[in-house]
Image (cartoon, rainbow, N blue to C red):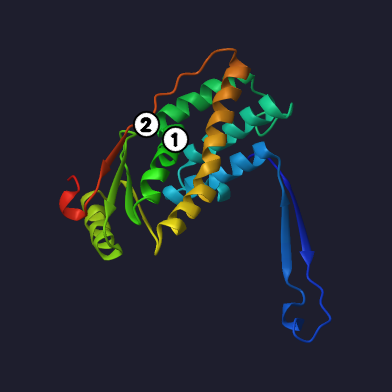
Amino acid sequence: MGIAGIHDVYSYDVNSESGKHLKGLLVEVQYRTEVQHAWATAVEVIGFITENQPKFEKGDDRYNHAMALASEILARAYEDEKGPYPERTSIEVVQEFLALDAELNLLNTLRGLNSASTEVSENRNSILIFHGSGELEVRTYRSATEALASLFELEKEHPGTDIVLVKADTSEEVRFAFKNYFSDARDFIQLVEDGCQKLSGKKQINAKRRTKRSSGGAKGARR
């Protein structure tokens, strides 16, 4: 599934005594274009924030199908190639992707993560709640203990909701994690939306996800 990059696997060869325990260690090097990297990162993010793993074609098939359609859009729009659905017209690919996106709130979820990254980076302990309505709620806490206790309660109250705890010893650690893990989602969103427009000849309109914010610990969090 998806846009293929190039993967080289090397076996580490060493003659020194100190490094002999590493002899035979396999090292993988991946080569990707910027478009391929944006798609692959979006796949990783989706696996991180949901129980679905499109990277391994596990979980809800709709996510797997949506990302495969996205790869088809990117391949046609930017690489003059065809991907996993070569027999379909560009209009069919775009329409099917947009229908799935409306059903899953896929692009809005990724967009919401980007808007939440600044909020989270300024508060060392945060919980992201992805409501089924497409709304992202951010709750922040003064301590990791308080955030963890709230996480357990939220998981009991909302068993079918995607809830993610983001915590670190310093705000710099959270900021680093979000910049490296979520920043490329912006590239993916832009590339897909521009690709849909390019292939269909029509401007695609996507409603932005609303983000609720709560702070001050569990007492101040909304129920």
Residue most extreme to the top: 201
* Numbered-mark total: 2
Q: Residue at x 71, y 52 (%)?
A: 30
Q: Secondary structure at mark 1?
A: helix
Q: Residue furthest bottom?
A: 17
Tell me the crowding category of disc 1: few under 14, some 14 to 19, or many 20 or more residues within 10 angstroms, Cα based.
Answer: many
Point out the residue furthest to the right here. Answer: 15
Q: Is residue 1 left or right of residue 166?
A: right
The amino acid on which the numbered mark 1 sits, given as a three-letter code, is: Arg
Is 106 rendered above or below residue 169?
A: above
> Residue 208: x percent and y percent?
39, 28
The residue wearing badge 2 is 209
Q: Are marks 1 and 2 in contact (CB under 8 Å)?
A: yes
Q: Earlier in the sequence, mark 1 or mark 2?
A: 1
User: Is 186 located above or below residue 48 in the figure?
Assistant: above
Q: Amino acid at mark 2?
A: Arg
Residue at (60, 44) in percent of width and height: 40
Residue shown at the point (73%, 30%) measured from the top left: 79
Query: Can residue 183 be seen here?
Result: yes
Real-space CA distance between mark 1 and mark 2, rounded to the nearest whole angstrom: 7 Å
Identify whether 92 is placed above or below 165: above
Element at badge 2? loop
Which mark, by number, is residue 187? none
Query: Residue drawn 41% across and 44% down?
Result: 118
Residue that mark 1 sits on: 111
